[in-house]
Image (cartoon, rainbow, N blue to C red):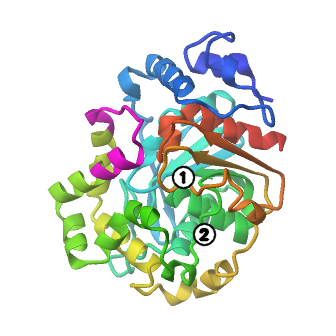
């Protein structure tokens, strides 16, 4: 059970503060409202500076598999580890408010830049710049190995949730528990060949743009990339009142020299328009069977995210066969950890009680 006094102090509130009062435990937690999270955001801003612009501590780097991974780390070195995984077009700052909340509860929080983002670099110029799903999952396994972590709670959204899903499904011995925004996000290439409802296809416009050479050129052009990613932020998080500085802080991560190549390959591969690598075929074959996830899991749906599947989690419920809880956050969009940091941190903490 969460120590509410410690959690409230991390937010700059007393134990009886407005945010602490909303942290109600596992099965009894009510879905967070936009108003609740706006109050939480105000409290976090007080603790970390205007609009939460306080930076992480100096970033670290470690050689891990094909990469030298740049990552942020907060919390006690010997605390139970939590790895927070960002999505696209985002970076580690999606967890800038989540990380200190978890650290205040004694967790060692590790937030890596995914391949092609921020300070993460390939160790060889000859390595194919591959964005397929199992490659990103194995990057995280390699990071855990490099840091000497046998097991960790994995928590993420978008690309990060998919990466965490894959590890939980294929290597459950490495995943203590899972927090997944959007539920079961493992890509099925065969299913992806089938058309979706028009409104859903409309939300995925940039995937089809990236399938063209015009889209590739746009991602390689700094100004067009900047404007495109900002448009995605605006449209998939329609209720999030972020400022320009918040976006620019993250957009700096898109200057990675491999960013365009990784993003374009990721989306083209998902549409079967680009080949993967032979080294990942055994993992992709296993993922094609839609393996169930047995580790303790909290799934989070963001009500205002255009990619949230209807049905309040029912569409993917059968993929989670272990201890499980589902929550829908009202009035929250796609970048859930940054829009609703207290609810996301609470979900991570609550996995211990499943």
Q: Is residue 11 left or right of residue 252?
A: right
Residue at the spot of label 2: 186
> What is the quadrant of the C terminus in the image?
top right
Residue stretch rendered in magenta on the structure? 231-246
The percent coordinates of residue 21 (x first, y second) are 69, 17
The percent coordinates of residue 345 (x first, y second) are 63, 36
Q: Is residue 262 left or right of residue 77?
A: left
For label 2, the crowd category at 10 Å Cα-Cα, with few meaning under 14, some 14 to 19 and many 20 or more, is: many
Task: Name which of mark 2 and mark 1 comes first in the sequence.
Answer: 1
> What is the quadrant of the N terminus in the image?
top right
Query: SS for tag 1?
Result: loop
Alpha-carbon span between mark 2 and mark 1 = 12 Å
Q: Which of the 4 image quadrants contains residue 266?
A: bottom left
> Relative to the observer, which residue lies in front, 304 or 348?
304
Residue 78 visible (yes or no): no
Q: Is residue 305 above or below residue 321?
A: above
Residue at the spot of label 1: 157
Q: Is residue 140 left or right of residue 316?
A: left
Query: SS for tag 2?
Result: loop
The percent coordinates of residue 24 (x first, y second) are 75, 26
The total of numbered circles placed on residues is: 2
Q: Is residue 142 above or below residue 118?
A: below
Q: Which of the 4 image quadrants contains residue 119?
A: bottom left
Residue 323 visible (yes or no): yes
Q: At 71% across and 68% down in the image, what residue appears?
A: 169
Q: At 58% across and 77% down in the image, what residue appears?
A: 188
Q: Is residue 330 left or right of residue 31?
A: left
Q: Which mark is residue 223?
A: none
For label 1, the crowd category at 10 Å Cα-Cα, with few meaning under 14, some 14 to 19 and many 20 or more, is: many
As for residue 38 lying within the magenta part, the answer is no
């Amino acid at each position: 059970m969460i120590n509410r006094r410690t959690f409230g102090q991390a937010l700059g509130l007393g134990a009886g503060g407005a945010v602490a009062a909303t942290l109600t435990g596992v099965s009894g937690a009510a879905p967070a409202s936009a108003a609740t999270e706006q109050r939480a955001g105000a409290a976090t801003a007080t603790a970390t500076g205007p609009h939460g612009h306080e930076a992480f501590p100096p970033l670290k780097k470690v050689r891990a598999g094909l990469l030298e991974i740049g990552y942020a780390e907060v919390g006690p070195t010997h605390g139970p580890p939590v790895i927070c995984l960002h999505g696209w077009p985002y970076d580690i700052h999606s967890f800038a408010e989540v990380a200190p909340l978890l650290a205040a509860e004694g967790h060692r929080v590790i937030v890596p830049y995914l391949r092609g983002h921020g300070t993460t670099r390939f160790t060889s110029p000859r390595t194919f710049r591959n964005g397929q799903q199992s490659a990103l999952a194995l990057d995280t396994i390699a990071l855990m190995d490099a840091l000497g972590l046998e097991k960790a709670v994995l928590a993420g959204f978008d690309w990060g949730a998919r990466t965490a899903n894959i590890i939980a499904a294929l290597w459950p011995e490495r995943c203590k528990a899972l927090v997944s925004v959007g539920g079961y996000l493992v890509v099925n290439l065969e299913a992806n060949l089938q058309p979706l409802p028009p409104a859903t296809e409309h939300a995925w416009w940039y995937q089809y743009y990236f399938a063209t050479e015009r889209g590739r050129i746009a991602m390689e052009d700094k100004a067009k990339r900047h404007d495109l990613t900002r448009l995605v932020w605006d449209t998939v998080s329609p209720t999030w009142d972020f400022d320009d500085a918040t976006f620019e802080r993250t957009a700096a991560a898109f200057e990675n020299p491999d960013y365009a190549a990784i993003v374009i390959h990721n989306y083209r591969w998902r549409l079967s328009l680009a080949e993967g690598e032979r080294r990942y075929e055994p993992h992709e074959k296993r993922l094609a069977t839609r393996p169930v996830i047995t580790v303790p899991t909290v799934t989070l749906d963001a009500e205002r995210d255009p990619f949230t599947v209807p049905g309040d989690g029912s569409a993917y419920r059968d993929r989670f066969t272990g201890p499980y809880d589902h929550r829908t956050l009202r009035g929250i969009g796609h970048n859930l950890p940054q829009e609703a940091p207290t609810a996301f941190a609470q979900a991570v903490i609550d996995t211990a009680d499943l």
